[in-house]
Amino acid sequence: MAPDEGDSMKRLIVSVAALALVFQVPGSAWACHRNRGGCASACGYGGGVQYQVSDQQQKRTVYECVPETHVEERTITELVPTPRQIQQQVTVCTPTYRNVERQVTTLQCSYEQRQVQRTCLVPVTTMVERTIVECVPEYQNVQQQVTVMVPEYQQVQQQRQVCVPRQVTEVVPCQITVCTPTMVQLPPSCQNPCGATVCRMVPHVETVNRTIVRYVPEMRNETVTVNVCNYRPTQQTVTRQVCTLRQVQRNIQVPVCRLEPKTETVTVSVPVTTPVTRNVTVQVCELVPSVQNRTVTVVECVPTSRKVQVPVTTYKTVTREITVNVPVVTCVPAPVAPCAY
């Protein structure tokens, strides 16, 4: 038996033992439930009763299956593939060629000259007079009335808006830099131990009013004269050349070709077939069987016995005592209220 099966059996036995202990309840508790009067009739009290459950430790005997594993020596038989060499005879067909004399009849073609008559069609061309109709163009002047659109121009006064720039003068203050000659006292130096007074241009900023001219767009209405073109229909007489076709008949000579039969004698080559028999040498292939000895490797499965060590698990029943808590139900009389008569 496998170790997993032993553990499952052990857990099953312990569960059954615990379930049997739970259902072992004292007889007095069950007696209280079987009587219709409850615990009052069982305990001898006429008043109300109360149930009290307490745990009591009791010893129980439990049987367990303990697995024991030991090693046993067993003999097993295995099929071991063993190759061996065997001798076999094989028949092999070898192709062999030999020359054979055979007669072959062939058709030999030759040509003979013969006189034959044949009829063929020879083209003959003759001139034939035919009448044809031609279209000759003729031109003539024809007077026609046509309508011509003559343009006429008329001056019309129209009002339109014109954008005219208006000149506006504006005074704008501007700042400019002005250099003013100023006398500056120089301190004494190595070149001029006594010092000196020098005139230098000192720049300073002045505000000057400048007049700026700018143009402002201004819309004005003015009257202008516009030439308007109108077309007037006018009837005019024009002369046009009109082409007409006139049919004219005339005779012409036309070559006509026709085929006339003609018989003639010609010499032609006629093929003549003559059978000819001759001897030829032909190679014939034959298969010659021959027996050959060959060594073939054959694999055979030979049964072989060997001893192996196998672990074997057995189960032994062991008895042990366990302490369990058993619920015990006791009846406790409740206080009785005085009766009122």
Image (spheres, grey):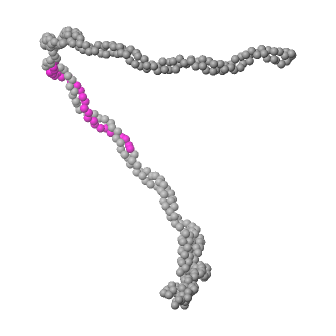
Q: Nearer the viewer, residue 300 or 15?
A: 15
Q: Nearer the viewer, residue 45 or 121?
A: 45
278 over 326 or under it: above or below: above
Q: Nearer the viewer, residue 3 or 120?
A: 3
- 209 falls in the magenta region: no
Name which quarter of the figure residue 9 lies in.
bottom right
Name which quarter of the figure residue 336 lies in.
bottom right
Q: Main secondary structure of the magenta part?
A: strand
270 over 5 or under it: above or below: above
Total number of numbered discs in the rendering: 0
- 98 falls in the magenta region: yes
Residue 96 is situated, as x and y percent measured from the top left of the image, at 38, 43
Q: Horizontally, is 20 left or right of 177 in the view?
A: left
Please name the residue shown 27% across and 36% down the image.
104
32 over 142 or under it: above or below: below
Residue 127 visible somewhere in the drawing? no
Please name the residue shown 51% across and 84% down the image.
33
Please name the residue shown 37% across and 46% down the image.
287
Q: Nearer the viewer, residue 285 or 339?
A: 339
Residue 17 is situated, as x and y percent measured from the top left of the image, at 55, 78
Bounds of the magenta segment: 95-122
Residue 56 is situated, as x and y percent measured from the top left of the image, at 60, 82
Please name the residue shown 52% across and 66% down the image.
77
Residue 89 visible somewhere in the drawing? yes
Quick one: quadrant of the N terminus? Answer: bottom right
Name which quarter of the figure residue 272 lies in.
top left
The extreme right residue here reads 193
Residue 217 is situated, as x and y percent measured from the top left of the image, at 50, 20
Q: Horizontally, is 302 left or right of 104 in the view?
A: right
